Image: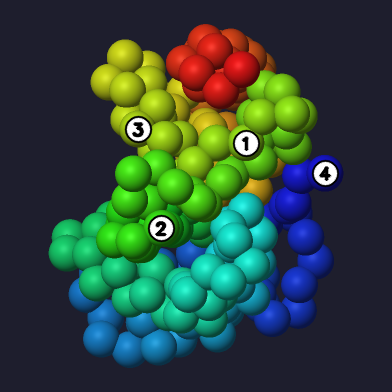
Amino acid sequence: MEKEWSRREDPSMNGTTDVTRILTELSGGSPRAADELFPLVYDELRRLASKSLRSERPDHTLQATALVHEAYLRLVGQENAQWRGRAHFLAVAAQIVRRILVDHARSSKRLRRGGDRAKVPLDNVVLISPQHDYDIVGLDAALTRLADQMPRQARVVEMRFFGGATHEEMAEALRVTTRTIERDWRFARAWLFRELGPAHA
């Protein structure tokens, strides 16, 4: 079942309006906006991090709290970022979580010679095939190839896998219709099946 970002009632979020206002201040260079924003988005970033780490090995050395803090520091540390609102912020968060997890996986010795790699179950995410798991570095490479040809479709997969976004949230962040997102999702699923499926059959 897909997790929701912005549609979920969460008292800690204090409303989309507050987050959007603070993001506008952050874009304008306000020094205290980052401190104000953190408690408002922490719970959602924590859910995003926990969801992504559930696909990793139980003994994964990167914990959700550390992932949240590193992702947040990278988010608010971006120079000249022009945040278009909460959906855009969380879409970029999904991208950053992807980068952190892939960097962590690449630096891990368990990836050497392909042995005992961290597996990513895609049955509930990309719905390719429930009997296949894929390592996160392999998924990242496939998404990079997809982005070279179809950048928006790659973002759709990224936002759903690393952020648990709904079609409505992706449409808002990418500024397209939900019908376009549905088409992108169908295309991306078929493309990833072709790229990843045969190699793991």
| Residue highlighted by disc 1 | 133
Badge 3 local density, few (<14 within 10 Å), some, or many (20+)?
Answer: few
| Residue 49 visible in the picture | yes
Mark pair 1, 3: CA separation: 15 Å
Q: In terms of depth relative to the viewer, which is nearer, 27 or 155?
A: 155
Identify residue for label 2. 110
- Callout 4 crowding tier (Cα within 10 Å): few <14, some 14–19, many ≥20: few
Q: Secondary structure at mark 2?
A: helix
Query: SS for tag 3?
Result: helix
Residue contact between numbered discs 3 and 2, judged by CB atoms under 8 Å: no
| Picture quadrant of residue 186 | top right
- The residue that disc 3 covers is 141
Q: Of the residues tagged 1 and 2, which is closer to the observer?
A: 2
Q: Earlier in the sequence, mark 1 or mark 2?
A: 2
Hey, what amino acid is under mark 4? Met
Q: Nearer the viewer, residue 108 or 123?
A: 108
Q: CA distance from mark 1 to mark 2?
A: 16 Å
x then y, percent, for residue 64:
56, 75
What distance separates the C-alpha of mark 4 from that of mark 1? 18 Å
Disc on res. 90: none
Residue 38 picture location, percent across and down: 48, 81
Provide the residue designation for mark 4.
1
The Cα–Cα distance between marks 3 and 2, rounded to whole angstroms, is: 18 Å
Q: Which quadrant is the N terminus positioned in? A: top right
State the image quarter where residue 154 is shown: top left
Which comes before the other along the chain, label 2 or label 4? 4
**Residue 3, how many percent across, how many down?**
74, 51
Type of the residue with mark 2? Arg
